[in-house]
Image (cartoon, rainbow, N blue to C red):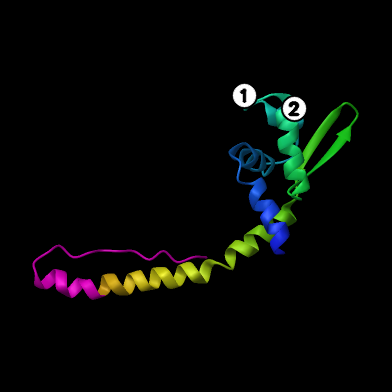
Amino acid sequence: MQTDQLDVVLSALADPIRRRIVERLGKGEATVTDLSEPFDVSAPAISRHLGVLERAGLITRERHGTWRTCRLRPEAIADLGTWLGGLQPVWDRRFDGLEAVLAAQQPVALATGARPVTHHHQESS
């Protein structure tokens, strides 16, 4: 994902209403009416949110007679996941460093009679 596109996607997802819309569309296609039901905002406001998501490439909107349906673009979410996954090694190194610090403190804690520090490193899949 290119930097400019990433900026647009992350900006679109910065709004909690838009994130909830994306979560809902993750379950399947929905009409604009269905998407607007859980929110206490006007129809034009929902339309603006959908426009932001569409311009970011996260959703598509189609007209079916008088209904407009929205659908998530899984490839856009996959691209974002790939970018975020690229950050995983950074966090793994930080957790490994923290684990080393905690392990070094363990003998000190035992020597002073303090309760040992326990920790669990969760492996990513």
| Tag 2–tag 1 contact (CB < 8 Å) | no
Q: Which residues are magenta?
A: 104-125
Badge 1: few (under 14), some or many (20 or more) residues near its Cα, within 10 Å? few
Q: Amino acid at mark 2?
A: Pro
- Identify residue for label 2: 44
Q: Position of residue 5 (x, y in %)?
A: 72, 58
Q: Position of residue 67 (x, y in %)?
A: 84, 28
Image position of 20 with respect to 108: above or below = above
- Identify residue for label 1: 40
In the picture as drawn, the residue positioned furthest to the right comes out as 65
Residue at horizontal 41 percent and vertical 64 percent from the top: 122
Q: How many marks?
A: 2
Q: Secondary structure at mark 2?
A: helix
Residue at horizontal 88 percent and vertical 32 percent from the top: 64
For marks 2 and 1, give the CA distance. 12 Å
Image position of 40 with respect to 120: above or below = above
**70 falls in the magenta region:** no
**Which circle marks residue 14 in the picture?**
none
**108 falls in the magenta region:** yes
Residue at horizontal 34 percent and vertical 64 percent from the top: 120
Q: Amino acid at mark 1?
A: Asp
Residue at horizontal 69 percent and vertical 24 percent from the top: 42
Q: Position of residue 97 (x, y in %)?
A: 37, 73
Q: Secondary structure at mark 1?
A: loop
Left or right relative to 35: residue 113:
left
Q: Nearer the viewer, residue 71 or 36?
A: 36
Q: Position of residue 115 (x, y in %)?
A: 15, 62
Q: Main secondary structure of the magenta part?
A: loop
Q: Nearer the viewer, residue 17 or 68?
A: 17
